Amino acid sequence: MPVIDTPVHIALEEKYGAHNYHPLPVVLSRGSGVYVWDTDQNRYLDFLSGYSALNQGHCHPAIIEALTQQAQRLTLTSRAFYNDQLGPYEKFLCTYFGYDKLLPMNTGVEAVETAIKLCRKWAYQHKKIEENSAVVIVCEGNFHGRTSAVISFSSDFDSKNRFGPYMPGFRTIPYDDIDALNNALSDPNVAGFLVEPIQGEAGVVVPTEGYLQAAYRACQQANVLFIADEIQTGLGRTGARLACDHEEVRPDILILGKALSGGTLPVSAVLADDEIMLVIQPGQHGSTYGGNPLACAVAEASITAIENEKMAANAKEMGQRFRSGLEKINSPHISLVRGKGLMNAVVIDHPNPEAAWKLCIAMMQQGLLAKPTHGDKIRFAPPLIITAAQIDDALTIIKKSLSVLDQ
């Protein structure tokens, strides 16, 4: 295969690909652990981790072994038949998280859609809400995906503008506002509260301590399902198995994705107890690839790697080190450092609206990859296997790169 240089790769995507992303101008060709290499063999610290799909690092040996072994045996049966991987995987994940049932899907937004359908069906069957009247409460600043239903309750202009008409049945309230939630819960047609324990796309917005616990209790009192979107926050990212674990909250419906496959293929899951999960009967929901043998083998290996290598504990320790290091830089261009575990962000204070992008380019040139979100915020989310020395290398790069904003 002929070698293609970086500008040609970028030009090919520009010409033949949809323009629905704005990538950094780097073409990656290889990854291992916390590092990736471009087509010119320059090495970078990956501080995006595929939006937390790569918690275990690039090409984790145990995950790749499970992938390659299963790929040579059986990859897909559809759910028209049983396969020898799905049942053991369902038992494994239900036991691990403490739920009765698992519904396997592929992408994160499919899992969100699944949770919404479960919530509505439960509301009509168990809460006895009048048909087609169920309301799901969501939060301002949310990001749960970009399907037509999900953008219907998005407050992100780019995700939503000119994609209507929008699906009804959602009520938006401020995030981290327990009074607003209590007020919304007074509506007897409310079926569920869908929330990110930490808002990732909004710029790693961490709620006030106690908010999740208070929200969960309020939902219990109102007979409303607490639905946690842990697609980005789960699986060790915040320094615990789930972000909800920090406040001892057990969601009625738990949504997982991204790192469930260690960055190898789309795998997502919805977990709930029987009263909720069994409202869906054959023919009412499904997916050709959901629960395929390859995904099941990979997901079990991915969870096992997180657990065996104590990645959540490392995320907690390294996250503290990283945030402390950022604060010690004491740059006038960083107005705020926030995060939990290895899910962190900075808010850039600069008159240039492109300052965050400019800083990301400078960091890229120094060997660290990160990406802005919502203009003035930069997320930092490396694989959970990162070491103290690598954290310190990253802090050195960030400190050096910040000088570009002095110009």
Image (tube, rainbow, N blue to C red):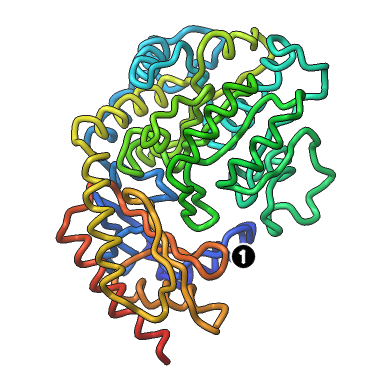
Q: Position of residue 126 (x, y in %)?
A: 68, 10
Query: Which residue type does callout 1 highlight?
Result: Lys
Q: Is residue 403 visible?
A: yes
Q: Position of residue 284 (x, y in %)?
A: 69, 14
Q: Position of residue 310 (x, y in %)?
A: 20, 36
Residue at x 26% of width, y 57% of height:
35
Q: Nearer the viewer, residue 280 or 216?
A: 216
Does 311 appear above or below 355? above
Q: Secondary structure at mark 1?
A: helix
Does 193 appear above or below 32? above
Q: Position of residue 94 (x, y in %)?
A: 40, 16
How packed mark 1 is, by other alpha carbons closer than 10 Å (few <14, some 14-19, many 20 or more), is: few
In the picture as drawn, the residue positioned furthest to the left comes out as 389
Q: Nearer the viewer, residue 52 or 85?
A: 52
Q: Is residue 84 left or right of residue 183?
A: left
The image quadrant where one finds the C terminus is: bottom left
In the picture as drawn, the residue positioned furthest to the bottom comes out as 407
Numbered disc total: 1
Q: Nearer the viewer, residue 260 or 271?
A: 271
Mark 1 lies on residue: 15
Q: Is residue 266 visible?
A: no
Residue 36 appears in which quarter of the rendering?
A: bottom left
Q: Is residue 177 left or right of residue 154?
A: left
Residue at x 40% of width, y 43% of height:
53
Residue at x 77% of width, y 17% of height:
129
Residue at x 26% of width, y 63% of height:
324
Does 146 appear above or below 250? below
Q: Nearer the viewer, residue 268 or 249?
A: 249
The image quadrant where one finds the N terminus is: bottom left
